[in-house]
Image (spheres, rainbow, N blue to C red):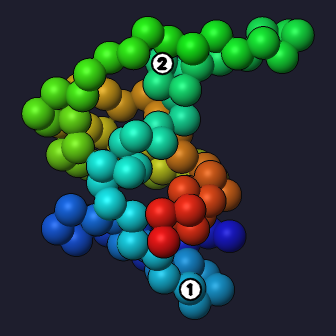
Amino acid sequence: MQPADCQVIGTELAIRWADGAESFVALETLRRFCPCAGCMGEQDIFGKTYLPPVRPYGPNAFHLQGLEPVGSYAIQPRWADGHASGLYSWEYLRRVADSAS
């Protein structure tokens, strides 16, 4: 499920998957689906999810400054507002891309 190519084009992340499929995800959607504990919350050992406080997105929240590969399983976006703790596994990124289309 790895991508063959992944790059920002305008305000979208364009992904060409190894199976030949292509996905285009708006950067705003990518940020809103950030999987980090600070954005999505985290679960305790009993399965209870603790949600973080709701924070408004600032003017640079949807401006992507870079994408860093993490091993062979994920990417880590670096946003202009300083947020960079979300790791998007290829499987998660494909689900986000599929839900956005």
Residue drawn at x 60%, y 82% is: 18
Residue placed most toward the observer, 82 or 95: 95
Q: Is residue 38 above or below residue 17?
A: above
Q: Residue furthest left?
A: 59
Locate the N terminus by quadrant: bottom right
The amino acid type found where label 2 is placed reads Gly
| Residue 91 seen | yes
Q: Is residue 58 above or below residue 16?
A: above
Q: Is residue 34 above or below residue 66?
A: above
Q: Residue furthest bottom?
A: 20
Marks 1/2: CA–CA distance = 31 Å
**Residue 92 location (% of width, % of height):** 62, 52
Mark 2 crowd level (few <14, some 14–19, many ≥20, 10 Å Cα): some
**Residue 97 location (% of width, % of height):** 51, 64
| Residue 90 seen | no
The amino acid type found where label 1 is placed reads Ala
SS for callout 2: helix
SS for callout 1: loop
**Residue 61 location (% of width, % of height):** 22, 35
Mark on residue 38? 2
Q: If you read the primary sequence from the N terminus, does the residue marked by circle 1 or circle 2 appear first?
A: 1
- Judging by the rendered image, the residue that carries numbered circle 1 is 21
